[in-house]
């Protein structure tokens, strides 16, 4: 459960930003945080994605760590393996250790247009 309206607003902005990542592309937690102007908040992006109810229309599986890996953890209750399968289904190769060719599939959006889209979304939610 989300504790505050501020936290809820951050989560919704994360979910919206992630929904813009095209199929067959990846972003890192830190990259998503940067898009939101929340530099250094990669971990918070991860927590926002973890709060999604699954299944979700938000393509959360397209967000990985900066090392080019799926963040594998028992605390993810199997969502790490689900992420692996979803990425493979999109044509992104993932090895048994959760490593991916990040630079090959990294989404490099027009940052100005992306910032405007995220800003307009935030204003519409107020």
Image (cartoon, rainbow, N blue to C red):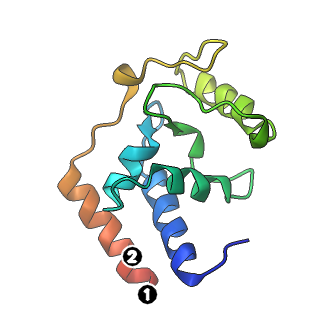
Residue 84 screen position, x and y as percent = 65, 26
Question: Which of 111 and 73 lies nearest the eye of the viewer?
Answer: 73
Pointer 2 residue: 122
Question: Which of 46 and 62 lies nearest the eye of the viewer?
Answer: 46
Determine the CA span between mark 2 and mark 1: 7 Å
Q: Is residue 19 left or right of residue 108?
A: right
Q: Is residue 66 left or right of residue 51?
A: left
Residue 107 screen position, x and y as percent = 34, 36
Hey, which residue is sitting farthest bottom in the picture?
126
Q: Secondary structure at mark 1?
A: loop
Q: Quadrant of the N terminus?
A: bottom right
Kindly identify the residue that appears in the image at 43 percent across and 87 percent down.
126
Taking 8 as reference, is 46 above or below it? above
Kindly identify the residue that appears in the image at 48 percent across and 36 percent down.
23
Hey, which residue is sitting farthest front in the picture?
40
Task: Check whether the beta carbons of the residues at disc 2 and disc 1 lie within 8 A of each other.
Answer: yes
Q: Is residue 14 left or right of residue 121?
A: right
Q: Secondary structure at mark 2?
A: helix
Q: Image quarter for residue 88?
A: top right
Hey, which residue is sitting farthest top in the picture?
95
Pointer 1 residue: 126
Q: Image quarter for residue 77?
A: top right
Kindly identify the residue that appears in the image at 69 percent across and 26 percent down.
85
Crowd class of label 2 (few under 14; some 14 to 19; many from 20; radius 10 Å): some
Taking 7 as reference, is 45 above or below it? above
Residue 68 screen position, x and y as percent = 46, 25
Residue 9 screen position, x and y as percent = 50, 75
Taking 90 as reference, is 31 above or below it? below
Question: Which of 71 and 115 lies nearest the eye of the viewer?
Answer: 71
Taking 30 as reference, is 100 above or below it? above
């Amino acid at each position: 459960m989300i504790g505050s309206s501020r936290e809820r607003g951050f989560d919704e902005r994360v979910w919206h930003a992630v929904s813009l990542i095209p199929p067959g592309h990846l972003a890192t937690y830190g990259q998503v945080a940067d898009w939101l102007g929340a530099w250094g908040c990669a971990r918070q992006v991860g927590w926002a994605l973890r709060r999604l109810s699954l299944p979700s229309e938000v393509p959360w599986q397209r967000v990985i760590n900066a090392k080019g890996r799926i963040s594998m953890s028992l605390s993810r209750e199997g969502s790490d393996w689900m992420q692996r399968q979803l990425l493979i289904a999109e044509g992104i190769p993932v090895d048994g250790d959760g490593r991916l060719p990040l630079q090959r599939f990294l989404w490099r959006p027009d940052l100005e247009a992306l910032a405007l889209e995220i800003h307009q979304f935030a204003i519409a939610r107020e």
